[in-house]
Image (spheres, rainbow, N blue to C red):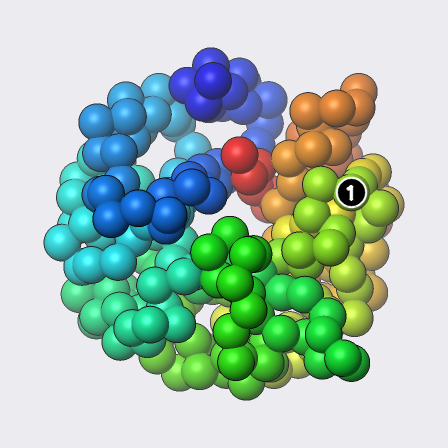
Amino acid sequence: PVLPAVKVYNQREVDELILVDILANQSDNDPDFESIDEFGQDCFVPLTIGGGITRIDQVQRLLRAGADKVAVNTAAYACPNLISEIARRHGAQCVVASIDVRAQDGYWICFSHAGKKITNREVVAWARELEDRGAGEILITSIERDGSMQGYDLPLIEAVVRSVKIPVIASGGAGNYQHMVDAVIQAGASAVAAASVFHFTEQTPAGAKAALAEAGIQVRQAFVG
């Protein structure tokens, strides 16, 4: 259940929470504003909400419900102006452009609908466009690595980092603290997001912070659920 997880991670020294409803884009329903309002009341760190966001009025309701930022993925392909409109109305810091990527024939290709539908977008060009449209951050997820705990896709992260000036959050593959250090130092990520490593191992957000600090990194981290 999400609410108990929010309460737990509030106490585990995470600096941000990212909650994404990966099934929301399979229907025309609005985000679950009532649940998000409940999460917001129990969340004492910055909260990013994603999944099923297709209209600016939904963003406004999410912000009123307690979200600090919104993550947009699938809708941006059909309506790139949504990114621009969110940034114009609420500021670039409010909009996180989420990109799910899979390698195809030697290229990194973007996928929509929780990684199920291929698009005609190559990741570097798409990341640049999202930045130009006003996104304040990019959350880049390797579909192949996600949940594997085999390490982030460092070349993918580095390619995106080199292509934009806004912060890039590495997602998909963290299995130990060194993977997080590598994503920042080797690939240049501004932040790392992790979930499985905290769910299925004895490693903790506090331990991750300590390892990152020992490597000389000023720490911020996010938990993705």
81 up-or-down from 15: above or below: below
Q: Choose top left, top right, bottom left or bottom right for residue 19.
A: top left
Do we see residue 165 in this rendering? Answer: no
Residue in the image at 34% along x and 25% along y: 39
Residue in the image at 40% along x and 54% along y: 71
Q: Secondary structure at mark 1?
A: loop
Give the x, y percent position of residue 43: 38, 26
Q: Which residue is mark 1?
A: 148
Q: Nearer the viewer, residue 126 or 87?
A: 126
45 up-or-down from 52: above or below: above
Q: Choose top left, top right, bottom left or bottom right for residue 2.
A: top left
Give the left or right position of residue 55, taking residue 165 as reference.
left
Residue in the image at 65% along x and 40% along y: 194
Disc 1 residue type? Answer: Ser
Do we see residue 77 in this rendering? Answer: yes
Badge count: 1
Give the x, y percent position of residue 95: 35, 60
161 up-or-down from 213: above or below: below
8 up-or-down from 114: above or below: above
Seen as rendered, the residue at the extreme left is: 57
Residue in the image at 80% along x and 41% along y: 149
Give the x, y percent position of residue 69: 34, 50
Give the x, y percent position of residue 207: 76, 29
Mark 1, other Cα within 10 Å: few <14 / some 14–19 / many ≥20: some
Q: Nearer the viewer, residue 206 or 71?
A: 71
